[in-house]
Amino acid sequence: MIQADGITEPDASGIAQLDAPVLALILIKAGSWLHPRTRPRLNPTWSCMDVCRQWRDLVLSSPDRMAALLIEAHGPEDALVRAAGCTSRRMDRLALLRAALRSARADCSDGEALVAAARCGHEAAVGMLLEWRENAPRADCQDGQALIRAAANGHESIVCRLLNWREHAPRADCQDGEALVVAANSGHEDVVRLLLEWGVHAPRADCQDGQTLRRAAINGHETLVRLILGWSEHAPRADCHYGQALVNAAMSGHEATVRILLEWKEHAPRADCQNGSALIRAAGNGQEATVRLILDWREHAPRANCQDGAALVESAKNGHEAVVRLLLGRHEHAPRADCQHGEALIQAAENGHTDVVRLLLEWKEHAPKADCQGGQALVKAAEGGHLDVVRLLLEWREHAPRADCQNRKAFRLACKGGFGSVVELLQQHS
């Protein structure tokens, strides 16, 4: 017999007489489900789901019981951190935190509970921890990590509370302005403005060599990009870090942000910065509108064949047929369809992009040979099990690769991958 909060657990023969709430309590105390041999004797009027619901309701209704379970399962310190970051709206989170604080120091693990509460936006929990009567965590614990996590998640009131704390408040520019960077990354304009306008130790708008601008650009936060570039002091240059903000925005396809950067009144990045990297990244991610914008820019536009046709190779690799066609069809400086010894064809074949393979092979001039690089396109297509590409290459009207090229490498790789249809097709053409 087991005593549990005044309830005596019977043996298996009498368990069928228990209702779901009582059984739920027993299961909590026992820590496991019933032994399989007892299940046939369970009361058929309630189901396992009934017990689970009762278990959930019972635990959520008692912060003390929940704290005890967390402590038993994870230990006092981890239980405190979990209580501080509790996200259940049905649980009295402050009561849970208070119960967990009976067994762990408020500043355990260098204030990890404070960081968890700040990250989850639990302002009342943050206040409770900071004001705890003994062993309260420092507001700047972990070099300001609570401030940084609150900023990253846009919890403006917690950011303000931490910065205003009466002792050991974190600096607004801690970790070289990391709070500003992560707030900009997530697009929290109010937090960014709060940090930049902070009276003492405000982070510089160009901290971390313009990382704030680059993170805002890669996520397309246009308002923040304008705010940061136009800040009254220590604003980053629009072309900082060799134009990386432009490359980031182009890579993510944020056409409006690309335009803002290119049109900035001073120190605008060149459209062909980093030897055309913005074009290449946009092409690789299939951002057709951004590719067109960069190629048609009024000055310092990159050549469509920059870096020996890298934009074509990247777009073919990822199967962006419209971008491949756009690049090949440029009226000047178009990349050759067979650039880099047919690498675009090989990359498209490796990833099974049949339409791109056909487009390259059919291009009106400088089309790659189907057997370029010793039949490498066939080998890669066979290795990936791309039956349609293998068939297209083997049956191409001219310069088709031999099925046994590279000492039957395509056949061996198809066998290794278990692609029976590809193996059979290769045997037919051997």
Image (cartoon, rainbow, N blue to C red):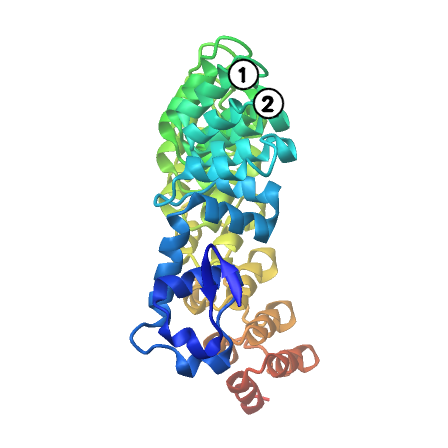
The mark found on residue 138 in the picture is 2
The residue located at (58%, 53%) in the rendering is 73
Helix, strand or loop for disc 2: loop
The residue that disc 1 covers is: 204
| On screen, residue 333 above or below 171 | below
The mark found on residue 1 in the picture is none
The amino acid on which the numbered mark 2 sits, given as a three-letter code, is: Arg
The amino acid on which the numbered mark 1 sits, given as a three-letter code, is: Arg
Helix, strand or loop for disc 1: loop
The residue located at (35%, 43%) in the rendering is 89
The residue located at (44%, 19%) in the rendering is 160
Q: Residue 90, how many percent across, how many down?
A: 34, 45
Q: Tag 2 or tag 1, which sits nearer the N-term?
A: 2
Quadrant where the image shows the C terminus: bottom right
Is 399 on the left-hand or right-hand side of 191? right
Nearer to the camera, 384 or 39: 39
